[in-house]
Image (cartoon, grey):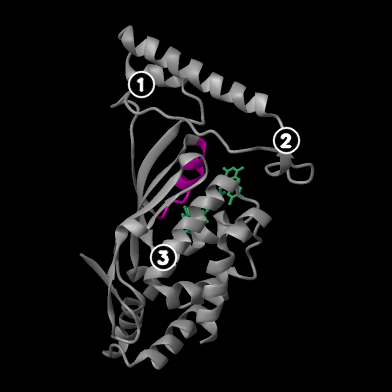
Protein backbone atom coordinates (compact mmCIF):
# COMPACT_ATOMS: atom_id res chain seq x y z
CA UNK A 1 0.00 0.00 0.00
CA UNK A 2 1.33 3.46 -0.92
CA UNK A 3 0.51 6.56 1.12
CA UNK A 4 1.15 10.28 1.14
CA UNK A 5 0.82 12.92 3.85
CA UNK A 6 -1.00 16.21 3.54
CA UNK A 7 0.11 19.28 5.47
CA UNK A 8 -2.60 18.74 8.11
CA UNK A 9 -0.80 15.58 9.17
CA UNK A 10 -3.31 13.20 7.57
CA UNK A 11 -2.06 10.09 5.81
CA UNK A 12 -3.89 9.11 2.61
CA UNK A 13 -3.88 5.77 0.88
CA UNK A 14 -3.03 6.04 -2.82
CA UNK A 15 -4.90 3.94 -5.33
CA UNK A 16 -2.27 3.67 -8.08
CA UNK A 17 -4.87 2.15 -10.42
CA UNK A 18 -6.56 5.54 -10.54
CA UNK A 19 -3.32 7.22 -11.59
CA UNK A 20 -3.56 5.58 -14.97
CA UNK A 21 -4.54 7.77 -17.92
CA UNK A 22 -5.44 6.61 -21.39
CA UNK A 23 -4.90 9.26 -24.04
CA UNK A 24 -5.36 9.78 -27.75
CA UNK A 25 -4.95 6.64 -29.89
CA UNK A 26 -4.29 4.38 -26.88
CA UNK A 27 -1.40 6.40 -25.53
CA UNK A 28 -0.95 5.85 -21.82
CA UNK A 29 0.61 7.47 -18.75
CA UNK A 30 0.56 5.48 -15.51
CA UNK A 31 2.10 6.37 -12.18
CA UNK A 32 4.07 3.30 -11.13
CA UNK A 33 5.62 4.53 -7.91
CA UNK A 34 6.56 7.66 -6.00
CA UNK A 35 8.51 8.89 -3.00
CA UNK A 36 7.66 12.00 -1.00
CA UNK A 37 4.88 14.56 -0.74
CA UNK A 38 4.36 18.18 0.35
CA UNK A 39 5.60 17.31 3.84
CA UNK A 40 8.88 15.97 2.38
CA UNK A 41 9.50 19.35 0.74
CA UNK A 42 8.99 21.13 4.08
CA UNK A 43 11.21 18.64 5.94
CA UNK A 44 13.97 19.02 3.33
CA UNK A 45 13.85 22.81 3.57
CA UNK A 46 13.87 22.85 7.39
CA UNK A 47 16.61 20.27 7.88
CA UNK A 48 19.04 23.18 7.54
CA UNK A 49 17.70 24.58 10.85
CA UNK A 50 17.11 21.14 12.41
CA UNK A 51 13.33 21.58 12.35
CA UNK A 52 10.48 19.65 10.72
CA UNK A 53 6.79 20.28 10.14
CA UNK A 54 5.25 23.25 11.98
CA UNK A 55 1.57 22.98 11.05
CA UNK A 56 -0.39 23.40 7.85
CA UNK A 57 -0.47 27.17 7.68
CA UNK A 58 3.26 27.76 8.24
CA UNK A 59 4.24 24.81 6.06
CA UNK A 60 2.09 25.97 3.18
CA UNK A 61 3.63 29.45 3.44
CA UNK A 62 7.11 27.94 3.39
CA UNK A 63 6.42 25.93 0.21
CA UNK A 64 5.09 29.03 -1.52
CA UNK A 65 8.12 31.02 -0.35
CA UNK A 66 10.49 28.37 -1.71
CA UNK A 67 8.78 28.42 -5.11
CA UNK A 68 8.52 32.21 -5.26
CA UNK A 69 12.20 32.70 -4.43
CA UNK A 70 13.43 29.77 -6.57
CA UNK A 71 14.82 27.74 -3.67
CA UNK A 72 14.35 24.67 -5.78
CA UNK A 73 16.33 21.84 -4.14
CA UNK A 74 13.66 20.86 -1.54
CA UNK A 75 11.36 19.98 -4.48
CA UNK A 76 13.93 17.41 -5.61
CA UNK A 77 12.98 15.14 -2.68
CA UNK A 78 9.68 14.21 -4.30
CA UNK A 79 10.24 11.53 -6.94
CA UNK A 80 7.85 9.96 -9.45
CA UNK A 81 8.19 6.91 -11.67
CA UNK A 82 5.87 6.81 -14.69
CA UNK A 83 5.15 4.18 -17.31
CA UNK A 84 4.57 5.86 -20.66
CA UNK A 85 3.25 4.33 -23.87
CA UNK A 86 3.48 6.61 -26.89
CA UNK A 87 4.55 6.66 -30.55
CA UNK A 88 8.30 6.43 -31.13
CA UNK A 89 8.63 10.02 -32.40
CA UNK A 90 6.89 11.33 -29.26
CA UNK A 91 9.18 9.23 -27.05
CA UNK A 92 12.10 11.01 -28.74
CA UNK A 93 10.71 14.33 -27.47
CA UNK A 94 10.45 12.98 -23.92
CA UNK A 95 13.90 11.39 -24.00
CA UNK A 96 15.50 14.75 -24.81
CA UNK A 97 14.96 15.63 -21.15
CA UNK A 98 18.27 14.54 -19.71
CA UNK A 99 17.69 14.73 -15.98
CA UNK A 100 15.41 11.69 -15.87
CA UNK A 101 16.26 8.00 -15.68
CA UNK A 102 14.75 5.89 -18.42
CA UNK A 103 14.37 2.24 -19.32
CA UNK A 104 12.75 1.39 -22.60
CA UNK A 105 11.34 -1.47 -24.61
CA UNK A 106 13.93 -2.74 -27.08
CA UNK A 107 12.94 -3.95 -30.53
CA UNK A 108 16.34 -5.72 -30.64
CA UNK A 109 15.00 -8.09 -27.96
CA UNK A 110 11.38 -8.61 -28.88
CA UNK A 111 9.19 -8.73 -31.96
CA UNK A 112 5.98 -9.11 -29.91
CA UNK A 113 3.06 -6.71 -29.34
CA UNK A 114 3.68 -4.30 -32.19
CA UNK A 115 0.94 -1.68 -32.43
CA UNK A 116 0.67 1.71 -34.10
CA UNK A 117 -0.60 5.15 -33.17
CA UNK A 118 -3.53 6.25 -35.26
CA UNK A 119 -4.43 9.90 -34.57
CA UNK A 120 -8.14 10.51 -34.04
CA UNK A 121 -7.98 13.37 -36.54
CA UNK A 122 -5.59 14.75 -39.15
CA UNK A 123 -4.34 18.15 -38.02
CA UNK A 124 -3.30 20.51 -40.80
CA UNK A 125 0.11 22.15 -41.13
CA UNK A 126 0.32 25.50 -39.35
CA UNK A 127 1.02 28.44 -41.67
CA UNK A 128 2.59 30.52 -38.90
CA UNK A 129 4.52 27.94 -36.85
CA UNK A 130 6.81 25.74 -38.93
CA UNK A 131 6.80 22.95 -36.35
CA UNK A 132 3.12 23.13 -35.44
CA UNK A 133 -0.38 22.26 -36.57
CA UNK A 134 -3.69 24.06 -36.56
CA UNK A 135 -7.18 23.06 -37.59
CA UNK A 136 -8.28 19.72 -38.96
CA UNK A 137 -8.37 18.19 -42.42
CA UNK A 138 -11.52 16.19 -43.04
CA UNK A 139 -10.16 13.23 -44.98
CA UNK A 140 -11.19 9.88 -43.57
CA UNK A 141 -9.74 8.13 -46.65
CA UNK A 142 -6.26 9.46 -45.73
CA UNK A 143 -6.68 8.11 -42.22
CA UNK A 144 -7.67 4.78 -43.72
CA UNK A 145 -4.57 4.85 -45.96
CA UNK A 146 -2.43 5.54 -42.91
CA UNK A 147 -3.88 2.45 -41.26
CA UNK A 148 -3.26 0.38 -44.40
CA UNK A 149 0.33 1.62 -44.51
CA UNK A 150 0.83 0.51 -40.87
CA UNK A 151 -0.61 -2.90 -41.75
CA UNK A 152 1.67 -3.33 -44.75
CA UNK A 153 4.75 -2.25 -42.79
CA UNK A 154 3.81 -4.78 -40.11
CA UNK A 155 3.37 -7.50 -42.76
CA UNK A 156 6.85 -6.79 -44.15
CA UNK A 157 8.28 -6.78 -40.64
CA UNK A 158 6.79 -10.24 -39.94
CA UNK A 159 8.04 -11.50 -43.31
CA UNK A 160 11.58 -10.43 -42.43
CA UNK A 161 11.36 -11.98 -38.95
CA UNK A 162 9.88 -15.22 -40.34
CA UNK A 163 12.74 -15.37 -42.87
CA UNK A 164 15.22 -15.30 -39.97
CA UNK A 165 16.32 -11.66 -40.34
CA UNK A 166 17.55 -10.22 -37.02
CA UNK A 167 15.06 -8.13 -35.05
CA UNK A 168 17.55 -5.23 -35.07
CA UNK A 169 17.39 -5.16 -38.89
CA UNK A 170 13.69 -5.98 -39.35
CA UNK A 171 12.68 -3.05 -37.15
CA UNK A 172 13.94 -0.56 -39.74
CA UNK A 173 10.66 -1.01 -41.63
CA UNK A 174 8.54 0.06 -38.64
CA UNK A 175 7.38 3.68 -39.01
CA UNK A 176 7.63 6.48 -36.44
CA UNK A 177 4.02 5.85 -35.42
CA UNK A 178 4.91 2.49 -33.87
CA UNK A 179 4.20 2.44 -30.15
CA UNK A 180 7.01 2.19 -27.69
CA UNK A 181 6.92 2.06 -23.90
CA UNK A 182 9.28 3.09 -21.16
CA UNK A 183 9.73 3.98 -17.51
CA UNK A 184 10.67 7.54 -16.63
CA UNK A 185 11.84 8.46 -13.14
CA UNK A 186 12.78 11.87 -11.85
CA UNK A 187 12.04 14.53 -9.29
CA UNK A 188 9.30 17.13 -9.03
CA UNK A 189 11.59 20.03 -9.93
CA UNK A 190 12.57 18.48 -13.22
CA UNK A 191 9.08 17.22 -14.02
CA UNK A 192 7.78 20.78 -13.63
CA UNK A 193 10.47 21.93 -16.07
CA UNK A 194 9.26 19.20 -18.43
CA UNK A 195 5.66 20.41 -17.97
CA UNK A 196 6.68 24.00 -18.69
CA UNK A 197 8.22 23.02 -22.02
CA UNK A 198 5.90 20.24 -23.12
CA UNK A 199 2.48 21.43 -21.99
CA UNK A 200 3.04 24.57 -24.04
CA UNK A 201 1.23 24.92 -27.35
CA UNK A 202 4.56 24.94 -29.24
CA UNK A 203 5.12 21.30 -28.26
CA UNK A 204 3.34 18.57 -30.23
CA UNK A 205 -0.20 17.80 -29.03
CA UNK A 206 0.64 14.18 -28.18
CA UNK A 207 3.49 15.20 -25.85
CA UNK A 208 1.30 17.96 -24.41
CA UNK A 209 -1.09 15.19 -23.46
CA UNK A 210 1.75 13.24 -21.74
CA UNK A 211 2.72 16.38 -19.79
CA UNK A 212 -0.92 16.97 -18.77
CA UNK A 213 -1.31 13.43 -17.39
CA UNK A 214 1.99 13.68 -15.48
CA UNK A 215 0.95 17.05 -14.00
CA UNK A 216 -2.41 15.60 -12.92
CA UNK A 217 -0.79 12.68 -11.07
CA UNK A 218 1.77 14.90 -9.36
CA UNK A 219 -0.92 17.33 -8.23
CA UNK A 220 -2.81 14.50 -6.51
CA UNK A 221 0.21 13.63 -4.34
CA UNK A 222 1.89 16.99 -3.70
CA UNK A 223 -0.81 19.60 -4.38
CA UNK A 224 0.76 22.56 -2.55
CA UNK A 225 4.20 22.09 -4.12
CA UNK A 226 2.87 21.47 -7.62
CA UNK A 227 0.48 24.43 -7.40
CA UNK A 228 3.17 26.77 -6.06
CA UNK A 229 5.63 25.78 -8.78
CA UNK A 230 2.89 26.19 -11.36
CA UNK A 231 2.02 29.65 -10.04
CA UNK A 232 5.53 31.09 -9.67
CA UNK A 233 7.40 29.30 -12.45
CA UNK A 234 5.03 28.18 -15.18
CA UNK A 235 1.74 30.08 -15.27
CA UNK A 236 3.00 33.24 -16.99
CA UNK A 237 5.38 31.37 -19.31
CA UNK A 238 3.27 28.57 -20.69
CA UNK A 239 0.75 29.16 -23.44
CA UNK A 240 -1.91 26.45 -23.69
CA UNK A 241 -3.53 25.35 -26.93
CA UNK A 242 -7.32 25.42 -26.98
CA UNK A 243 -7.50 21.62 -26.92
CA UNK A 244 -5.09 21.05 -24.05
CA UNK A 245 -6.42 24.13 -22.22
CA UNK A 246 -9.85 22.51 -22.20
CA UNK A 247 -8.38 19.23 -20.97
CA UNK A 248 -6.53 20.77 -18.00
CA UNK A 249 -9.04 23.55 -17.20
CA UNK A 250 -10.19 21.86 -13.98
CA UNK A 251 -6.62 21.11 -12.93
CA UNK A 252 -5.44 24.69 -13.52
CA UNK A 253 -8.41 25.98 -11.53
CA UNK A 254 -7.64 23.57 -8.68
CA UNK A 255 -3.94 24.57 -8.63
CA UNK A 256 -4.76 28.26 -8.60
CA UNK A 257 -7.31 27.77 -5.81
CA UNK A 258 -4.69 25.86 -3.83
CA UNK A 259 -2.21 28.76 -4.07
CA UNK A 260 -4.88 31.26 -2.98
CA UNK A 261 -5.64 29.35 0.25
C1 LIG B 1 8.67 23.13 -28.61
C2 LIG B 1 10.01 22.47 -28.66
C3 LIG B 1 10.66 22.31 -29.86
C4 LIG B 1 11.92 21.69 -29.91
N1 LIG B 1 12.54 21.55 -31.11
C5 LIG B 1 13.76 20.97 -31.17
C6 LIG B 1 14.43 20.79 -32.41
O1 LIG B 1 13.94 21.17 -33.45
N2 LIG B 1 15.63 20.16 -32.42
C7 LIG B 1 16.23 19.74 -31.25
O2 LIG B 1 17.34 19.21 -31.30
N3 LIG B 1 15.61 19.88 -30.06
C8 LIG B 1 14.40 20.46 -29.99
N4 LIG B 1 13.78 20.59 -28.77
C9 LIG B 1 14.41 20.02 -27.59
C10 LIG B 1 15.06 21.12 -26.70
O3 LIG B 1 16.11 21.77 -27.38
C11 LIG B 1 15.59 20.47 -25.42
O4 LIG B 1 16.56 19.51 -25.75
C12 LIG B 1 14.54 19.79 -24.60
O5 LIG B 1 13.38 20.56 -24.53
C13 LIG B 1 15.07 19.54 -23.19
O6 LIG B 1 15.15 20.77 -22.53
P1 LIG B 1 16.20 21.04 -21.38
O7 LIG B 1 17.58 20.87 -21.90
O8 LIG B 1 15.87 22.35 -20.75
O9 LIG B 1 15.77 19.88 -20.33
P2 LIG B 1 16.59 18.75 -19.61
O10 LIG B 1 17.45 17.98 -20.53
O11 LIG B 1 15.55 18.01 -18.83
O12 LIG B 1 17.51 19.53 -18.61
C14 LIG B 1 16.95 20.24 -17.51
C15 LIG B 1 17.87 21.40 -17.18
O13 LIG B 1 19.11 20.88 -16.72
C16 LIG B 1 20.16 21.71 -17.17
N5 LIG B 1 21.05 20.90 -18.05
C17 LIG B 1 20.86 19.62 -18.43
N6 LIG B 1 21.89 19.20 -19.18
C18 LIG B 1 22.73 20.24 -19.30
C19 LIG B 1 23.97 20.44 -19.96
N7 LIG B 1 24.54 19.48 -20.69
N8 LIG B 1 24.55 21.65 -19.85
C20 LIG B 1 23.99 22.64 -19.14
N9 LIG B 1 22.82 22.52 -18.48
C21 LIG B 1 22.20 21.34 -18.56
C22 LIG B 1 19.53 22.86 -17.91
O14 LIG B 1 19.30 23.92 -17.01
C23 LIG B 1 18.20 22.29 -18.36
O15 LIG B 1 17.21 23.25 -18.61
C24 LIG B 1 12.54 21.22 -28.71
C25 LIG B 1 11.85 21.39 -27.50
C26 LIG B 1 10.62 21.99 -27.45
C27 LIG B 1 9.92 22.14 -26.11
The residue beneath circle 3 is: 218
Residue found at x 42% / y 46%: 28
Residue at image mark 1: 168
Q: Residue at x 51, y 36 (%)?
A: 89
Q: How many marks?
A: 3
Secondary structure beneath disc 3?
Answer: helix
Q: Which class describes the residues within 10 Å of circle 3: few (<14), some (14-19), or many (20+)?
A: many
Q: Within 8 Å: ligand 1 and the Cβ of disc 2?
A: no
The residue lying at 34 percent from left, 60 percent from top is 80
How far apart are the alpha carbons under marks 2 and 3?
35 Å
Dot 1 crowding, Cα within 10 Å, few <14, some 14–19, many 20+? some
Q: Which residues are magenta?
A: 89-99
Q: Residue at x 30, y 59 (%)?
A: 16
Q: Main secondary structure of the magenta part?
A: helix
Q: Residue at label 2?
A: 137
Q: Which mark is residue 195?
A: none
Where does the image place residue 204, in percent across and percent down from the top left? Answer: 60, 46
Amino acid sequence: MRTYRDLNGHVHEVNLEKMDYEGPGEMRVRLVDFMGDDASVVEAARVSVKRGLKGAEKDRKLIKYLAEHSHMTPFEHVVFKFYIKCPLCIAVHVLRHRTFSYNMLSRRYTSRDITFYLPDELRSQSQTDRQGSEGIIEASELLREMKEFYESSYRLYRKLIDAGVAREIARFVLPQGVFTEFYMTGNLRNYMHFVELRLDRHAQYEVQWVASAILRCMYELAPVSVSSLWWYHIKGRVELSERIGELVKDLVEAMEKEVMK
